[in-house]
Amino acid sequence: MDGTVLVADDDRTIRTVLTQALTRAGCKVHATSSLTTLMRWVGEGKGDVVISDVVMPDGNGLEMLPKISQDRPDLPVIVISAQNTIMTAIQAAEAEAYDYLPKPFDLPDLMKRTAKALENRNRAPRRDEAIEHADGPDELPLVGKTAAMQALYRLVAKVMNTDLPVLISGESGTGKSLIARAIHDFSDRRTLPFVSVTGADLSDLEGPARVLARVRGGTLLIDEVGDLDAEVQARLVRMMDAPGDHAPRFMATSQNDLGQDVEEGTMRRDLFYRLSGATIHVPSLRERVDDIGLLAEHFLARIEREGGPHRWLSTEAAELFRSYSWPGNVRQLENTARRLSLTSRAEEITRAEVEAVLGNQPETGPIMRGGEGEKLGTSVHRHLRRYFDLHGNMLPPPGLYTRIIREVEAPLLEIALEATGGNQAKCADLLGINRNTLRKKITDLDIRVTRRRKLM
């Protein structure tokens, strides 16, 4: 890399790491913990790229972006932030940031983006990867720091102001309708109506005309399109082909694997192709375990802001939250947080209180089809393909092999230990590995060994 990078972050460790990495890559680096100093450097014409945190001791890093854009429109600014919400990404895009990365960021990924910014520093900001901001809710419960959620944010940004139909898939409770609403509220159509309909709204001949009159060129969301019968599907195809003078933007949600529905003949192929101009998969909580604690904190804090009691999870309660399967996904997690906020006896929520609440909830099987009777290799291939697709045109962060192996290995050892009642000798024999190897893996993967009832 060739160029001068200005780094602004109040964390000395981050400044040191970035300075060392960028210097080794061939860059000159000026690092500071002050936005005032950063803006002085920018005003003096220094720097080819800026890397800036958001929350700084003397101000907000996002608020200085408009002035940089006005004074030096060719200076790319990469925003890094520990505020891992879609709103931060939206605000960064509104301020015309070149790029946005959540903390903790992957250093090789940041270096790659910095190199690209240096190569393209005379090019306008990448609006295709930006999310246009509009007046909307102060806070959206789209929270996540995992790669899956950050990739989802980028994909939402890409489709925000296009006219492409959008098909949003995911299990119940993941927030599919919320994604659709966010796309509308931050798009160029935000001043027009957002109308959500079901099959019942299109069940008679006059249904499409009534719906189009309501939406008036805004956004039309078809809820659970996979549940529509053949007649309604045909009516929807005709409506999409001839929407009238004020054509809406079409979006649809589905819990089903619509590709499989097409193969089985329950979904019209032409409707599927019309709706899937862009496809967005909203990951389940099982696909973003590292976001569970963040979401729990988010909901407890929001409940407190709404006038509820001040609550937080104990370490043991947080571990149980993380290990629970959450069949109802984010919606179930929010309802659980609300119930615990009301029923907890003290400010700190205990593991026993969480067990009592989760134990009373009905068991819910997986919503997405394709798991029952499916070979393990096929299931793994499907999940890995989805993970790559979530990153759009970009590759996942480096180190993928180690991350995937760790994610598979840890639950395998945990389940095997539980099945053998915590007996490491039996577990090692079951797995076909040396007992010392098992012990080392338990330590390396930080697996808690508890003696439970044997499953075999």
Image (spheres, grey):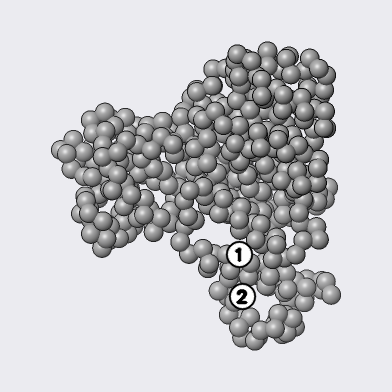
Give the residue displayed 76% in from the left and 57% down from the top: 371
Q: Position of residue 370 (x, y in %)?
A: 76, 54
Label 2 neighbourhood size at 10 Å, few (<14), some (14-19), many (20+)? Answer: some
Q: Seen from this angle, which residue lies furthest left?
A: 44
Look at the image and tell me whether residue 151 can be seen. yes
Look at the image and tell me whether residue 341 can be seen. no
- Position of the N terminus, as image quadrant, is bottom left
Is residue 453 rendered to the left or right of residue 188? right
Number of numbered markers: 2
Secondary structure beneath dot 1 equals helix
Q: Who comes first in sequence, dot 2 or dot 1? A: 1
Label 1 neighbourhood size at 10 Å, few (<14), some (14-19), many (20+)? Answer: few
Q: Nearer the viewer, mark 2 or mark 1?
A: 1
Q: Amino acid at mark 1?
A: Glu
Q: Which residue is disc 2 drawn over?
A: 442
In front here: 28 or 213?
213
Is residue 189 rendered to the left or right of residue 82? right
Above/below status of 429 relative to 43: below
Q: CA distance from mark 2 to mark 1?
A: 13 Å
Q: Amino acid at mark 2?
A: Ile
Give the residue displayed 36% in from the left and 54% down from the top: 112
Q: Position of residue 320 (x, y in %)?
A: 68, 57
Q: Which residue is disc 1 drawn over?
A: 407
Q: Position of residue 449 (x, y in %)?
A: 68, 73
